[in-house]
Image: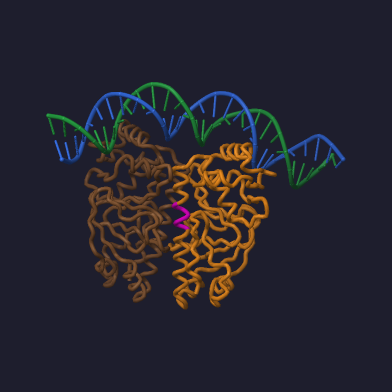
Chain colours: A brown, B orange, C green, D blue
Amino acid sequence: MLNHATVSSQPTQPFRFHAAATDHAEGEDSLWTAATRQTFVANRSVYSEGDAADRMFKVVTGAVRTFRLLEDGRRQVNAFYLAGEMFGLEAGETYHFCAEAITATQLLVIRRDALRRRMAARPEIMNDLWRLTASELERAQAHCVLLGRKSAMERVVSFLMSMDERVQHGEAIELPMSRQDIADFLGLTIETVSRTMTLLEEQKLIAMPSARRIVIRDRRPLAALDA
Amino acid sequence: MLNHATVSSQPTQPFRFHAAATDHAEGEDSLWTAATRQTFVANRSVYSEGDAADRMFKVVTGAVRTFRLLEDGRRQVNAFYLAGEMFGLEAGETYHFCAEAITATQLLVIRRDALRRRMAARPEIMNDLWRLTASELERAQAHCVLLGRKSAMERVVSFLMSMDERVQHGEAIELPMSRQDIADFLGLTIETVSRTMTLLEEQKLIAMPSARRIVIRDRRPLAALDA
DNA sequence: CGCAAACTTGAGCGTACTCAAGCGCAGTGG
DNA sequence: CCACTGCGCTTGAGTACGCTCAAGTTTGCG
């Protein structure tokens, strides 16, 4: 049985099953050992809105974005998934989003019928999947607060702090996604994201060795903005 | 067993179990017949953020809002729940939102341990609750698109269309919530909501016999705006 | 090295916000 | 019966934050 005490308390972070579930012989590993591995080049679609939701994924390396498009091309990025994070779990029959690899990406893929078989054998798995859905819900709700009520500066800081927590960071945060991806995630334009980051750099709160590498220089005021 | 084919295809609408599950002797009713009934006056809190999530609710009459507050008083309304709709289901141990009665409201209340007992007896119920969580997730994600990428006009129209579908409408839509509630739901200010509705009225797309009563006059262009 | 894509910067604009006043309706009391 | 009051809503004027359009600049890759 999976460790139920490890549901993330961080609503901005995708759910992960306990990484060190060594005392659970049939824990996480039993789910993903049956999985196949699949490699995607940058910008390759994993699935599209409306596709039959017959698989679930876990990022091994790389990064994935899920998003929705409006008719006129406006895009809302729903979430980014980094190494160790799972996505593509649907209760219904079809996906409600598009998912694309951001960079070269390796995914573990588990078929839904395999999932169902395992659930039949060990009903606790259903509970775990429910909690995964619930943690995605929590994340989406927190994102609504950001999109509905926060300024551009607060959004960008919130994003950077979240990435900082999720990336295994030696010094700098490596951003796999473009400014356009970030903008579409935060409900801003690419120019506003760029300007806001420049402002943070001018205020010496962050450093940008390159556009995709961010170093947090002064955590305190950033955390305050991320209330 | 509940009718699994009835997961709402409308992401903007809270989930309802099939209303006419007459062929399922132990369907929805078996869940809520064990429930107690509780009455709330307008603006009375149902639960607060951080409270132990030990109960789940179903609106009999009235309306409920769930929301989150930031330190400085900014508020994001997550959802409105009308008659027949359920809320307060959490996978974790505490609520992530505040819930308040908007008007005088009657709720069915089911305790979580009762829910757990029923799940133990009939595991399909867990599946139904998972689907309820999943439909809330879908709604939240659709709301992210609205908050991140839609104009004030599109947001207001989207809200009105959603209310129109959910309220059992004879002619007019009766809004239980204030302009402030709507504004905090749509990520706008009260003035913008008011101005936008006035504009819709001037364009003869809606009529407002009173501030809380809205009549859809020309559905076509409104539906186009709600793409 | 050269090109294209990604990112940054600048100038001007527009949508939605802020601040403020006015309106309308329901409830209350003279 | 009607003024009074309070609250919710509307309307107005001015502003600001983030967007649009348009160069530049940097980066990565062939």
- The image quarter containing residue A116 is bottom left
Q: Is residue A101 above or below residue B37?
A: above
Residue at the (56%, 56%) spot, across then down: B81
- The image quarter containing residue A138 is bottom left
Residue at the (63%, 47%) spot, across then down: B216
Q: Residue furthest front?
A: B220
- Return the x and y of residue B217 as percentages of the image width and height: 64, 45
User: Would residue A213 be found to the left or right of residue A90 on screen?
Assistant: left
User: Would residue A81 be found to the left or right of residue B186 on screen?
Assistant: left
User: Would residue A36 be found to the left or right of residue A112 on screen?
Assistant: left
Q: Is residue B73 visible?
A: no
- Return the x and y of residue B61 as percentages of the image width and height: 64, 60
- Return the x and y of residue A193 as percentages of the image width and height: 35, 37
Q: Is residue B34 above or below residue A62?
A: below
Residue at the (29%, 65%) spot, across then down: A110
- Return the x and y of residue B104 as percentages of the image width and height: 66, 56
Magenta highlight on residue B139: yes
- The image quarter containing residue B201 is top right
From which residue to which does the magenta span run?
Answer: B136-141
Q: How many marks?
A: 0
Magenta highlight on residue B31: no
Residue at the (53%, 66%) spot, across then down: B17
The rendered magenta stretch, by its main secondary structure, is classed as helix
Q: Nearer the viewer, residue B100 or B204?
A: B204
User: Would residue B30 be found to the left or right of residue A42 on screen?
Assistant: right
Q: Is residue B92 visible?
A: yes
